Amino acid sequence: MIGEIDAADIVLIAAPMHNFTISAQLRTYIDYITRPGKTFGYTEAGPKGLLVDRPVYIISTRGGQYGDGAPDKPNPYDFQSSYLRHILSFIGLTSVEVIAANGMDMGDKPQAEGLAAARTKIDAIVKAKVTELAA
Ligand SMILES: Cc1cc2nc3c(=O)[nH]c(=O)nc-3n(C[C@H](O)[C@H](O)[C@H](O)COP(=O)(O)O)c2cc1C
């Protein structure tokens, strides 16, 4: 599993919000890939991530409303985004972008709005990448 993530150009994580944080399944995956001497190490200056940085995108589906997961205006109940940013940077992956789909369990209108916001963000990411590759 570490070899798989190490070989990836881009990492995409599907993360449904469970009890304000990540699912047990995703937590188990993180337990498998967060290993001393392999994905992090300790130096005199403190812990150091050993994976080479690369873009990480997190698709975060939420039943309720928790904002967009951006680090500059965190929602106090969104423990998912802050935890994922922390643990991924601990293993060396600091370029983390959260794509939030809020309101999934709040009825048709909030769900459609949540999906539209997520799709808009995905489109913007793809457009920026295409522009970068064309330059
Ligand atoms: C065990 C469990 C816990 C959940 N906890 C939360 C929660 O804390 N906050 C929230 O907004 N939604 C919560 N939900 C709802 C899911 O985040 C929501 O249904 C989401 O759309 C699931 O994503 P998926 O359809 O991609 O699996 C929970 C769902 C489950 C099954």
Image (cartoon, helix red, strand yellow):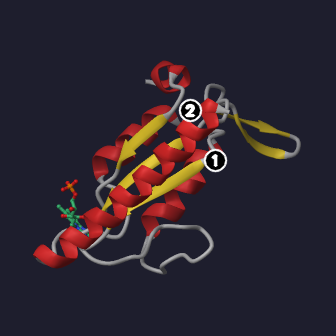
The x and y percentages for residue 116 are: 29, 64
Q: Residues within 10 Å of mark 1 (few under 14, many from 20)?
A: some
Give the residue drawn at x 38%, y 38%: 29
Give the residue drawn at x 43%, y 72%: 78
The x and y percentages for residue 99 are: 42, 57
Position of residue 38 in the picture relative to residue 23 (left or right): right
Image quarter of the N terminus: top left
Q: Tell me: residue 103, above or below residue 82.
A: below
Q: Write down which quadrant ligand 1 falls in.
A: bottom left
Which residue type does callout 1 highlight? Ser
Q: Tell me: residue 122, above or below residue 5.
A: below
Residue sitting nearer the eye, 57 or 18: 57
Image quarter of the C terminus: top right
Which residue type does callout 2 highlight? Arg
Residue sitting nearer the eye, 101 or 78: 101
Position of residue 13 in the picture relative to residue 64 (left or right): right
The x and y percentages for residue 132 are: 63, 37
Position of residue 86 in the picture relative to residue 43 (left or right): left
Residue sitting nearer the eye, 93 or 104: 104
Residue 77, image quadrant: bottom left
First along the sequence among labels 2 and 1 = 2
The x and y percentages for residue 75 are: 48, 79
Reading the image, the residue beneath label 1 is 89
Q: Residues within 10 Å of mark 2 (few under 14, many from 20)?
A: some
Reading the image, the residue beneath label 2 is 35
Residue sitting nearer the eye, 52 or 91: 52
